[in-house]
Image (cartoon, rainbow, N blue to C red):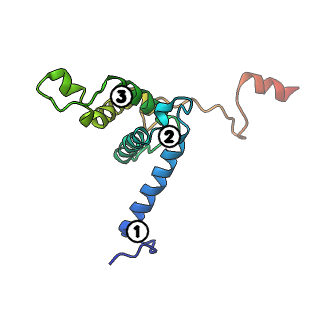
C-alpha cells in the first residue's frame, strides 16, 4: 500500500498532490476571469475552463500552466457557448456540430490548436528550447552592460 505521507520518488501520491496544486493555480485565475460577465461566474463554465487548462498542461508538462492562458481559453469558451444548444437530434450535421455534449472537447481542440500556432512559445522562458534565437549577450567580462550608452556613462 502506498503511503500518502511518503515523499519517495515512486509514490503515486506525489502526482496526485502535484495535480492538486496545478488545479489550485488554474482555479485562482479562472475565478478572476471576466467577473463583470455573469457567464464566467457559472460553475459549469468554470469547470470546463479548469478541465481544458488542466488537461492541456498535463499534456504539455514541458511548459505547464502560465498566467494568461485562462484568458485565451475563456474567449474560446464564450464563443463556443454562444453557438451551442441542447438537442438530442444528431442526424442533422449542424445539430451534431453544435451539440452541447461535445462542447468541452471542441473547446479543448481549439485551444490546443491555437497554442500550437506559436502562442505556446510566447509563454516559454527558454528561447533556445523553443527554436527562437537567443538575444546577444550584452555584458562585458565584468558583468556590466556592454552597450554604447553604458560605455559613455562609465567614462563620465
- Does 42 appear above or below 154? below
Outermost residue toward the bottom? 1
In-front residue for pair 145/38 = 38
Which numbered disc covers residue 103?
none
Is disc 3 placed on a helix, strand or loop?
A: helix
Which numbered disc covers residue 81?
3
Residue 131 is drawn in which quadrant?
Answer: top left
Residue at the (42%, 43%) spot, across then down: 50
Q: Residues within 10 Å of mark 2 (few under 14, many from 20)?
A: many
Residue annotated with mark 2 = 30
Residue at the (56%, 38%) spot, across then down: 32
Q: Quadrant of the N terminus?
A: bottom left
Which numbered disc covers residue 9?
1
Measure how far apart labels 2 and 3 are at the Cα level: 17 Å
In-front residue for pair 154/99 = 99
Task: Say how many tags the image has.
Answer: 3
Amino acid at each position: 500500500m502506498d503511503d500518502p505521507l511518503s515523499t519517495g520518488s515512486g509514490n503515486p501520491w506525489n502526482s496526485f498532490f502535484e495535480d492538486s496544486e496545478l488545479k489550485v493555480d488554474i482555479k485562482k485565475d479562472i475565478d478572476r476571469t471576466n467577473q463583470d460577465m455573469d457567464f464566467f461566474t457559472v460553475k459549469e463554465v468554470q469547470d470546463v475552463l479548469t478541465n481544458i487548462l488542466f488537461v492541456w498542461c498535463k499534456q504539455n508538462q514541458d511548459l505547464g500552466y502560465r498566467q494568461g492562458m485562462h484568458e485565451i481559453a475563456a474567449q474560446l469558451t464564450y464563443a463556443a457557448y454562444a453557438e451551442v444548444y441542447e438537442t438530442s437530434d444528431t442526424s442533422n450535421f449542424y445539430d451534431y456540430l453544435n451539440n452541447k455534449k461535445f462542447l468541452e472537447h471542441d473547446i479543448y481542440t481549439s485551444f490546443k490548436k491555437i497554442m500550437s500556432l506559436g502562442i505556446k512559445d510566447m509563454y516559454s522562458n527558454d528561447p533556445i528550447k523553443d527554436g527562437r534565437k537567443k538575444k546577444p549577450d550584452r555584458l562585458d567580462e565584468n558583468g556590466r552592460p556592454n552597450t554604447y550608452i553604458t560605455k559613455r556613462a562609465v567614462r563620465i
